[in-house]
Image (tube, rainbow, N blue to C red):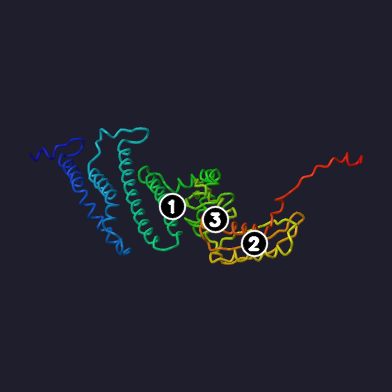
Amino acid sequence: MDDFFYQLYFDNEVKDYLISFGIILFILALNRFISKYFASLIFSLVKRIWSNVEKKAFIDLVIHPLGMFLVVFVSLAALHKLKFPGRWDVEIYRYTLKDIFHAIGTTVLIISFIGLLLRMIDFIATILEKKAAITEDQSDNQLILFFKDFFKVVLAIGGILMILHFAFNLHIGNLLTGLSIVGAAIALSLRESLENLIASFVIFFDKPFTTGDLVKVQSITGTVEKIGLRSTRIRTDQKTFVTVPNKQMVDSILDNLSLRTQRKGELKLEIDLNTSSQKLQELLSGIRPILNKKEIESSSTFMDAIGGNAFILTGEYFTAPITQSEFNSIKERINLAVLQLMEALEIQIAGANREIRIIDQEREWKR
């Protein structure tokens, strides 16, 4: 029986196969329990930083990628103890089969490790989002989403560089130097995308607007729903979904309507020239109490100009930063009240009664 364990198959003894595959079966059978134990250890470190973290939520999020990483790591470590069969060590396009298997194993290990780190970033972002939700400032929430995506991209690039270095034995320094010229050409071709990326940093740190703000940029008016790495998504007042490049959001004149302290309404009347000055004075006196209601914070009414076709009366009023529907209701009430006042005073709008005469000049000349 002892001779069987020491028999050689593919340059390895039977006992070496049994030990290696036994370790792999062990980690597969107890993977969930072991990964849960290590997740609890990691949670104890996280608990020191964030005291209000839920243990179950953390373990449920990281247990699967952590278990995958442990299985891959232990399996590769167990298989590494076996000798690669010499008869299999053939060369394929300047690479031996042993090098190819080593590159595949290293790649899978790095991918599983990066997957675990990505889940950790998701969990940290979830914790920060819960804390940011307590505050009234919505910019914190969008900033967390932005940096979550940003660090994921950085982590993915780092993972690719690790695969190139550890799996394919490429020198990253020389590779980056060689790619500098190519990178410069790519940067020129992607100049607009890079400008949008830089503009996104300007938006997050300068904060001209945040998610949920009502903004007007160029000819677009709507509510900001998301600020991304390249563009900003706006839900317009027509309920359409518009994507605006971040560079335009920074370079264009942007009106953040959510930051206004008041809403302005304007009343402009063109009164018929046949109206007497007494009637005009009565009209102005009647408009002032209409604009002096509790929902109106300040107002002014005055005779603006005497034109060749009409007397111009102007009324300006300011309300609190209320919603558009509420503001429209106030405007409607004011306009109807002013119209009723003009009817009571028998004052007409300029051009309301206009007569058109056609004179035959030739007939008049003969007379």
Camera-near label (1 vs 3) is: 3
Residue 101, quarter of picture? top left
Which residue is located at x 31 percent, y 35 percent? 97
CB atoms of marks 2 and 3 within 8 Å: no
Asked if 170 appears above or below 279 in the picture, the reply is: above
Identified by mark 3, the residue type is Asn
Q: Residue furthest right?
A: 366
10 Å neighbourhood of mark 3: few (<14), some, or many (≥20)?
few
Q: What kind of element bears circle 3?
A: helix
Label drawn at residue 315:
2
Q: Spatial distance from mark 2 to mark 1, Cα to Cα?
A: 51 Å
Mark 1 or mark 3: name the one nearer the start of the chain.
1
Asked if 322 appears above or below 237 in the picture, the reply is: below
Mark 2 or mark 3: name the one nearer the start of the chain.
2
Label drawn at residue 150:
1
Residue 145, quarter of picture? bottom left
Q: What kind of element bears circle 1?
A: helix
Spot occupied by residue 269 in the image (x, y as percentages of width and height) = 67, 57
Mark 2 or mark 1: name the one nearer the start of the chain.
1
Q: What kind of element bears circle 2?
A: strand
For disc 3, the marked residue is 328
